[in-house]
Amino acid sequence: MRIITGKARGLKLVTPKNYLVRPTADRVKEALFNIIQARIPGSQVLDAFAGTGNLGLEAWSRGAEQIVYFDKSRESLKLVRANVEKARAGEAVTLIHTDAVNGLAMMEQQRKQFDVIFSDPPYDKGLNQKVVEALEKWPVLKPGGLLVLEHSLGEDPGSYLPEGTEFRQEKYGDTKISLIVWKS
C-alpha cells in the first residue's frame, strides 16, 4: 500500500497486522483518483471510515487542503496517525474517534462542509446507506460535491439513493466504486 502520486508519491504506508481493516487496493485507488483528480486540489475531504488513512492521504498528496477522518476503532486511528506522521501531513489532518453517522452530525453542528466524502465501510453491513441517509439529513456535503462509495458487487446504491440521483459505477474485481454528484 503506497501513495501513488503527488507530493508523497511512492511513500509506503503502514499496513494493518490483521484483516479487520480492508484497505483499498492500489489499483482500485489509482483508477478512482484518475476519475476524480480534477476535484481534489484545494478540496475539503472527509473519509468517513478511515481504516488506514489510505484514501485521505492520497487526496492530500494530490493537493487536498484539509482531510477529516472518522473511525470508531482506536486501533484504526493509531494506524492512520502513524501514516499521517510518516507522510508529514499532520497540519492538514483531523482525526475524530466516532462512527460515521455521529461524525456527520458533529460536522453539521460545526457548520463544516466537504467537497469530497469517501465512504468505504466494512462491506454488506448497510453502512453506506446510513451515510447517505445522514447526508440527506445534514448538509455536510456541498451541493455538487462528490460522494464516493466503495462496496461489494452485491450492494446496490440505487436502492437507497434519493430518487432521481444519477451515479456512475466502476467495477474492480470484487469491488465496486459508486460516484455520486450530490444535489441536496
Image (cartoon, rainbow, N blue to C red):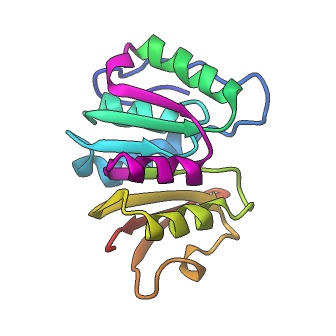
Q: Which of 100 and 123 is in front in this view?
A: 100
Residue that appears at 33% across and 73% down = 184
Instruction: Give yes or no for residue 101 being in the magenta stretch.
Output: yes
Q: Is 60 situated above or below 144? A: above
Q: In which quarter of the image is residue 125?
A: bottom right
Q: Is 47 situated above or below 174? A: above
Q: The N terminus is located in which quarter?
A: top right
Q: In this view, does 50 lie to the left or right of 125?
A: left
Q: Pinpoint residue 147: horizontal percent, then vertical percent.
A: 42, 60
Give the magenta-colored segment's residue range: 88-116
Q: In which quarter of the image is residue 59?
A: top left
Residue lying at the far front in this picture: please name it: 109
Q: Pinpoint residue 99: horizontal percent, then vertical percent.
A: 62, 45
Q: Which of 115 and 94 is in front in this view?
A: 94
Q: Is 7 situated above or below 60? A: above
Residue that appears at 40% across and 87% down = 164
Q: Nearer the viewer, residue 45 or 137?
A: 137
